[in-house]
Amino acid sequence: MLQSTIGPELSLDEIMQRWPNTIAVFLRHRMLCVGCPIASFHTINNACREYELDREAFLQELNLAIAD
C-alpha cells in the first residue's frame, strides 16, 4: 500500500520522486536537496537539522503539498 503521508524516516529522494509537489517546498526554503547526490541517503530529520528547520512544521508543509 502506498504511504499517504510523509514521515521523517523517508529519504528526501524518495519523497521528491513519489510526490513531485514537494519539490516546491524544498525550493521555498532554499534547500539544496533537489538534485543533490546524497538526497537518497538523507531523511527529513537530517535535512531539518542541517537547515535548522522545525521538523514538525516542515513535515506539515510537505504533507499539505501532497494533499493538493
Image (cartoon, grey):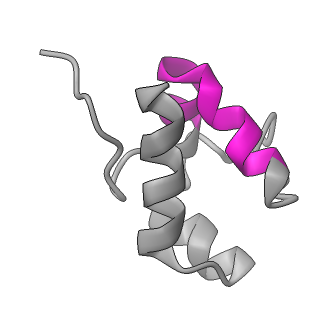
Question: Is residue 54 shown in magenta?
Answer: no
Residue at 69% from the left image edge and 77% from the top image edge: 50
Q: Residue furthest left?
A: 1
Q: Is residue 42 left or right of residue 35?
A: left
Magenta region, main secondary structure: helix
Q: Residue at x 62, y 26 (%)?
A: 21
- The one nearer the camera, 40 or 66, is 66
Residue 10 in which image quadrant: top left
Question: Where residue 60 sits: x, y (%)?
Answer: 44, 57
Taking the view exactly as shown, the residue that stands out farthest to the front is 68
The stretch in magenta equals 13-27
Q: Is residue 21 magenta?
A: yes
Measured along the vertical axis of the image, is residue 18 above or below residue 5? above
Report the front residue among 28 and 32: 28
Whether residue 43 is visible to the viewer of this picture, yes or no, is no
Left or right, 49 with reference to 7: right
Using the image, determine if residue 50 lies above or below residue 38: below
Residue lying at the far top of the rendered structure: 1
Residue at (63%, 78%) from the top-left corner?
A: 53
